[in-house]
Amino acid sequence: MIPILSRKTDVRSWRERIPLEGGAILVDKQQRWTSFDVVAKVRRLLGIKKIGHAGTLDPIATGLLIVCVGRATKQVGVFQELDKEYCVEIKLGARTKSEDAETPEYETTPIEHIQPQMIVTALDHFIGTFEQIPPTYSAVHVGGRRSYEFARQGRAVSLPPRTVTVHAIEDVEVALPLVRLTVRCSKGTYIRALARDVGNILGVGGYVTALRRTAIGDYSVEDALTIGELATVLSEGNHADVPLHR
């Protein structure tokens, strides 16, 4: 089993195993950092070149990012296959080109007629397995380039749908124009696309205003370390019984 560095781990024993086995780190990514920013920071902290992440988080998103180190980078695909859990906030009555708050609103629609039950019914439509078109502002490859590169240039991009599964949508809170909820889903599911499609069903548009990944498989963000905490742990060799504060 790959050694995992988390808030519960003895960092000394974890580091001892890295040269032969590699390892993984549960990181709590902060907002505005890209997933590659996190990889670069971990690379500098460890002084190890062979590092990769197991599943991109958008810059505006926070939460759990699993970073693989050394020989464990071969296991990135194993982590990527795991189901994900997200806490998301959606704004109804508006659209953005990126389908999140990265780009400005370009269209607004009155939502006075929207009732909570209408939102629940729209969400229920997306529980199960279905075809989802990824956002144009995404890392999907198009002709050897990332889709977001074309989108940011204002060029039209047509992406094929992909099969995804939403296992559950729970803890729905409606405080219009905002809707907050928890989504448990398969790999490859775009929460921004879910927000877009729910808004489209309601006829008013919608986009993600806040997103946090709370779990990957059985790994929880509650056990993850911020980059600041990781720096402290690695420099001081903290054990799990040394309290860390977020």
Image (spheres, rainbow, N blue to C red):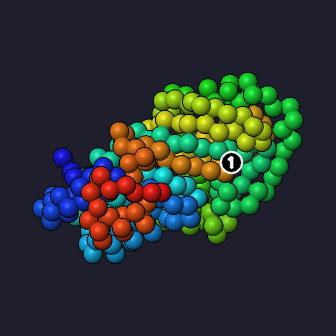
Assess disc 1: are there few (<14), some (14-19) or many (≥20) residues with their C-alpha within 10 Å of its C-alpha.
many
Residue 240, percent from left and from top: 29, 53
Disc 1 marks a residue whose amino acid type is Tyr
For image coordinates 55% across by 61% down, the residue present is: 31
For image coordinates 21% across by 58% down, the residue present is: 14
Q: Is residue 15 in view?
A: yes
Residue 18, percent from left and from top: 18, 62
Q: Is residue 158 in view?
A: no
Residue 155, percent from left and from top: 65, 64
Please tell me which residue lies in front, 111 or 237: 237
Asked which quadrant contains residue 66, the reply is: bottom left
Residue 98, percent from left and from top: 65, 57
Above or below residue 181? Residue 245 is below
Please tell me which residue lies in front, 42 or 114: 42
Above or below residue 114? Residue 228 is below
Please tell me which residue lies in front, 149 or 74: 74
Quick check: 173 left or right of 176? Answer: left
Q: Which residue is mark 1?
A: 207
